[in-house]
Image (cartoon, rainbow, N blue to C red):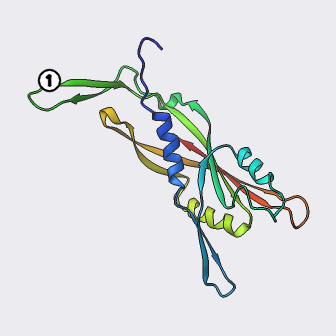
Amino acid sequence: MFGHQFYNQIIRRYVVMFGTLFNDIVVQRFNTAGSRIQAIKVPIAYGPKEKFLARVEQNPDLQKKSSVSLPRIGFEMVGMQYMPERKLSSTQRRVQVQGSAGSNNSIKSVFTPVPYDFNFNLSVFVKNADDGIQILEQILPFFQPAFTLSIDLVKSIGEKRDIPMVLNTINQQDDYEGDFSTRRALIYTLSFTAK
């Protein structure tokens, strides 16, 4: 567009940054004596909530090997919107001189970034309430309501930014219909905004 091709992978970096926040969550299971009998690292994958629900519902019979094991976390970018109140002058540039002293130096520059908010949904799928509460307790204390991350935005010029990640809402959904042999799925949906 406009005669210049470039791809700095900025939106991709936002998606990876968001998913990386939640990739070390562990659920522990205890026996009646209070001793830990199992620790499960919760897998995380990019994809819409409906995709994971469809995979869970494909196997309603609990006697067969499960197609998707719970707990599981899924996330997706659900939208982006321009934020004019954060706009800086569009004539400003960030400049980086490349090369060493006494050599042919080159100059790389980028214009001031355009301010957008990126909206993400994080879906937590569990089959019992205790697993869901454990996962939420590992996430919620960090968002009051924002958690700030540093990211290498444009590596070619060494531009780093602090990105506030704001927790907007938390919703709970209990998809449990049928008899006792039917699989239950509790879903917590957390809505975030990366500024």
Judge left or right: residue 35 versus residue 161. right
Task: Give coordinates of residue 128: x percent, y percent.
Answer: 74, 67
Residue 96: quadrant of the picture: top left
Residue 187: quadrant of the picture: bottom right
The kind of secondary structure element at disc 1 is loop
Task: Give coordinates of residue 48: x percent, y percent.
Answer: 68, 43
> Is the residue 177 above or below the residue 37 in the image?
above
- Please tell me which residue lies in front, 81 or 46: 46
Residue, x 10% and y 31% (percent of image)? 101
Q: Residue furthest front?
A: 64
- Residue, disc 1: 104
Residue, x 60% and y 65% (percent of image)? 137
Residue, x 68% and y 64% (percent of image)? 132
Q: Residues within 10 Å of mark 1 (few under 14, many from 20)?
A: few
Q: Residue furthest bottom?
A: 33
> Is the residue 135 above or below the residue 29 in the image?
above
Q: Amino acid at mark 1?
A: Asn
Residue, x 55% and y 48% (percent of image)? 166
Task: Give coordinates of residue 22: x percent, y percent.
Answer: 54, 55
Total marks placed: 1
Task: Give coordinates of residue 127: x percent, y percent.
Answer: 74, 64
Residue 173: quadrant of the picture: bottom right
Judge left or right: residue 102 versus residue 108. left
- Please tell me which residue lies in front, 29 or 169: 29
Judge left or right: residue 61 versus residue 46. right
Q: Residue furthest left?
A: 102
Q: Residue furthest top?
A: 3
> Is the residue 181 above or below the residue 155 in the image?
below
- Please tell me which residue lies in front, 177 or 120: 177
